Amino acid sequence: MPRGERVTSSSFGQFMASTAGRAARGVVGVVLIVVGLIVGSVGGWVLVAFGLVLLAAGVFDFCVITGLIDNIWSGAEVRAHGRRGEAPRTA
C-alpha cells in the first residue's frame, strides 16, 4: 500500500492531526505526567516519559501513530493527505 493510505486518509488520522486531536494529545499527556509523578517509581517515570511525548506531539504538531504506520510525522502533511480526497482504507 502506498505511503499515506493507511492512517493519514482515515477519519482517525485526520482527527489526530486536527486542532481537537492536538488538544486531546496535550491533555492526555499532562494527565499522564501528573499521574506518573504521583505514582513515582519506575512505572511512574515511564508514564511521565510517555506523557511528555504526547504533550510534545500536541504542541509541535506531529503524530506518532501516523509516523510509525505511514512514515508521515507532520500534522500538516497528514491534513494535506486528507484534503486530496484519498479514500479511507476499507479493509
Image (spheres, grey):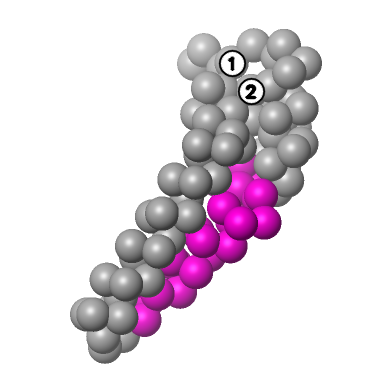
Decide: is 48 above or below 24. below
Nearer the N terminus, badge 1 or badge 2?
2
Where residue 27 appears, as percent x and y from the top left, is 41, 54
Q: Which residues are magenta?
A: 44-69
* Left or right for 3, reference 41: right
**Is residue 54 on the magenta stretch?**
yes
* Left or right for 26, reference 80: left
**Is residue 45 on the magenta stretch?**
yes
* Left or right for 42, reference 73: left
Q: Residue at x 73, y 18 (%)?
A: 83
Q: Residue at x 59, y 28 (%)?
A: 14
Q: Considering the image in quadrants, where does the N terminus appear?
A: top right
Density class for disc 2 (Cα within 10 Å; few <14, some 14-19, many ≥20) is many
Mark 1, secondary structure of its residue: loop
Note whether residue 71 is visible: no
Image label count: 2
Toward the left, the furthest residue is 39
Q: Name the residue that disc number 2 marks.
A: 9
Q: Residue at x 37, y 71 (%)?
A: 33
Which numbered dot is residue 88? Answer: 1
Decide: is 69 above or below 33. above
User: Are dots 1 and 2 in contact, CB under 8 Å?
Assistant: yes
Note whether residue 14 is visible: yes
Where residue 72 appears, as percent x and y from the top left, is 72, 43
> Quadrant of the rendered structure where residue 37 is?
bottom left
* Left or right for 37, reference 2: left
